[in-house]
């Protein structure tokens, strides 16, 4: 939970920065060329990706090691921790920090089927049992 709170307080990533992060998370480490190759044509300019990488690094989400003249980028922040922090922020900002209000909204607004709701209930019941066993 501490990591999630720390990420939530950090600068958030822009949509384009987040897209680069998705590529880095999926590859686990990447050179500039690897990242550019992940994009469809027309591919972004190397200077564009370099700028995004600098911003992401300055925000503390990635770092790099130098191999010759090339930089190999790797994530510092775990993908699940990043998204968990944003999800927690969503609940805090839009639902008054009430997970039950979020769950109510989510289950009604998404028009889930009975089968999907039952699957969701199983996931929640499993987490409840896990938490009880931790005590």
Image (spheres, helix red, strand yellow):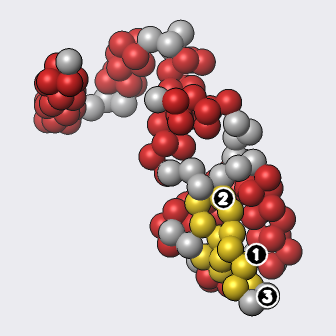
| Res 46 visible | yes
Q: CA distance from mark 3 to mark 2?
A: 18 Å
Find numbered disc 2 in the image and state the secondary structure of the residue it sits on.
strand
Quadrant in which the C terminus is drawn: top left
Residue sitting at 74 percent across and 39 percent down?
11
Residue at 60% across, 66% down: 74
Q: Nearer the viewer, mark 1 or mark 3?
A: 3
Q: Could you tell me if residue 40 is visible in this image?
A: no
Q: Residue at x 50, y 72 (%)?
A: 27
**Considering only order in the chain, which callout, 1 or 2, is on the residue closer to the N terminus?**
1
Q: Nearer the viewer, residue 59 or 107?
A: 59
- 43 or 123: nearer the viewer: 123
Q: CA distance from mark 2 to mark 1?
A: 20 Å
Answer yes or no: do the residues labelled 2 and 1 have beta carbons within 8 Å?
Answer: no
Q: Quadrant of residue 39?
A: bottom right
Task: Return the x and y of residue 84 as percentages of the image width and height.
Answer: 47, 37
Residue 33 drawn at (x, y percent): 68, 84
**C-alpha separation, residue under disc 1 versus residue under disc 3:** 21 Å
Q: Is residue 8 left or right of residue 111?
A: right
Question: Which of pointers 3 and 2 lies earlier in the amino acid sequence?
Answer: 2
State which quadrant residue 43 falls in. bottom right
Structural crowding at the residue carrying mark 3, measured as other residues with C-alpha within 10 Å and reported as few (<14), some (14–19) or many (≥20): few
Badge 1 marks a residue whose secondary structure is: loop
Q: Which mark is residue 62?
A: 2
Q: Are marks 1 and 3 in contact (CB under 8 Å)?
A: no
Residue 34, compared with residue 85, is above or below; it is: below
**Mark 2 residue crowding within 10 angstroms, few (<14) / some (14–19) / many (20+):** many
- On the image, numbered disc 3 is attached to which residue? 69
The secondary structure type at the circle numbered 3 is: loop
Vertical order, 114 against 60 (above or below): above
Instruction: Report the side of 9 relative to 105 (left or right).
Output: right
Residue assigned mark 1: 44
């Amino acid at each position: 939970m501490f990591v999630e709170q720390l990420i939530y307080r950090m600068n958030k990533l822009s949509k384009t920065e987040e897209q680069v992060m998705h590529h880095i998370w999926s590859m686990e480490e990447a050179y500039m060329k690897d990242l550019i190759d992940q994009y469809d044509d027309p591919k972004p300019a190397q200077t564009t990706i370099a700028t995004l990488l600098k911003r992401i690094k300055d925000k503390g989400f990635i770092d790099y090691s130098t191999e010759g003249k090339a930089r190999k980028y790797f994530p510092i922040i775990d993908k699940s921790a990043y998204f968990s922090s944003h999800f927690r922020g969503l609940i805090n900002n839009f639902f008054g920090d009430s997970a039950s209000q979020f769950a109510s909204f989510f289950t009604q607004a998404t028009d889930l089927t009975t089968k999907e709701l039952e699957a969701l209930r199983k996931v929640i019941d499993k987490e409840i049992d896990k938490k009880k066993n931790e005590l």
